[in-house]
Image (cartoon, rainbow, N blue to C red):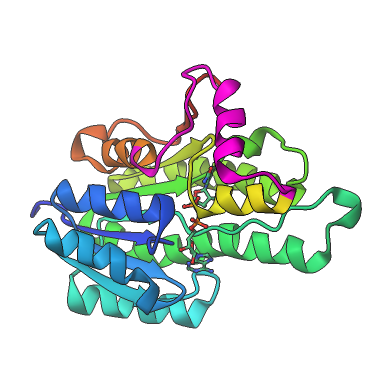
Amino acid sequence: MSKPSIAIVTGAARGIGAGVAKRLSSDGFAVAVVDLDEAASAGTIAAIAEAGGTAVAIGADVSNPDQVAAAFDRVVAELGAPSVLVNNAGIIRDNMLFKLGVDDWDAVMAVHLRGAFLMTKAAQKYMVEAKYGRIINLSSTSALGNRGQANYAAAKAGIQGFTKTLAIELGPFGITANAIAPGFIATEMTQATAERIGIPFDEHKVNAAAVIPVRRVGAPADIAHAASYFASEGAGFVSGQVIYVAGGPKD
Ligand code: NAD
């Protein structure tokens, strides 16, 4: 078997996904940077190219079956068959249950669950053929329950069940599936939360850090480090796990 070398990271135009894409590139992977808008991934692509890596930007909505199929056609044509998939694309539509609309419920389920399902179903075909693969799904500490996030918490808990089932079904083909459940990571997603609740982002981060045992908030590089481990060949006996990367114990 040739060295596994092609990774797909969804939602990699910015934030955690960009951090993961850059880290996998420095680990030696050619990376397909998938996000809603191809142009928005320019920064990630440039950073990877500057560091001497290979990356292509692909515009696709992970919840759309046709766009997912087209994205895989491009990955295979431009880079080759993928051996690593990181399902990272995500959105929040926070509200207390009594105000949470059906559209905000459906939108969150579509990106996190339908998106991870469609991307994984497309990827497993190549991984099963190669008898090798690494699937990494982004869950969240919110999977354990979080005020104002009934939709997101349900999706992120769903991701954990999805991951464990993938591990069981795909394990016989040399494919592992694991989930990373981040705590507070400073990105545009957490910045948007600060804006929504009317607190300056810096103050929001200080408040969050005060209750995290390691006394700091996380950075995309913290999650990228965990993803690098799960993506490695040496992690082949670790599957169906959820690792909380949250500066302290969570489960
Ligand atoms: P972010 O909002 O900064 O980035 C998310 C990216 O996903 C964006 O580039 C966005 O365009 C893309 N995206 C959204 N919908 C998409 C779709 N349908 N198809 C393709 N791309 C799409 O968020 P982030 O903080 O980097 O979060 C990344 C992942 O980590 C998400 O799954 C999020 O739920 C999870 N997470 C984040 C935190 C945190 O504190 N930031 C904590 C736990 C889990």
Name the residue nearer the viewer: 215 or 17. 215
Name the residue located 18 percent from the left edge and 71 percent from the top edge. Answer: 79
Q: Looking at the image, can residue 132 be seen?
A: no
Q: Give how far across and how far down residue 221 sits, in percent.
A: 33, 40
Give above or below for 80 relative to 225.
Answer: below
Give above or below for 250 relative to 218.
Answer: above
Name the residue located 65 percent from the left edge and 49 percent from the top edge. Answer: 193
In which quarter of the view is residue 55 placed? bottom left
Residue 204 drawn in magenta = yes
Q: Which residues are magenta?
A: 197-221
Name the residue located 49 percent from the left edge and 44 percent from the top edge. Answer: 163
In which quarter of the view is residue 5 placed? bottom left
Q: Give how far across and how far down residue 82 sits, in percent.
A: 25, 62
Name the residue nearer the viewer: 98 or 208. 208
Q: How many marks?
A: 0
Q: Quadrant of the C terminus?
A: top right
In the figure, is residue 77 to the left or right of 84? Answer: left
Q: Looking at the image, can residue 55 be seen?
A: yes
Q: Give how far across and how far down residue 32 sits, in percent.
A: 28, 66
Name the residue nearer the viewer: 202 or 131. 202
Residue 15 drawn in magenta = no
In the figure, is residue 142 to the left or right of 66? Answer: right
Give above or below for 85 relative to 125.
Answer: above
Name the residue located 47 percent from the left edge and 74 percent from the top edge. Answer: 36
Q: Give how far across and how far down residue 208 sits, in percent.
A: 59, 30
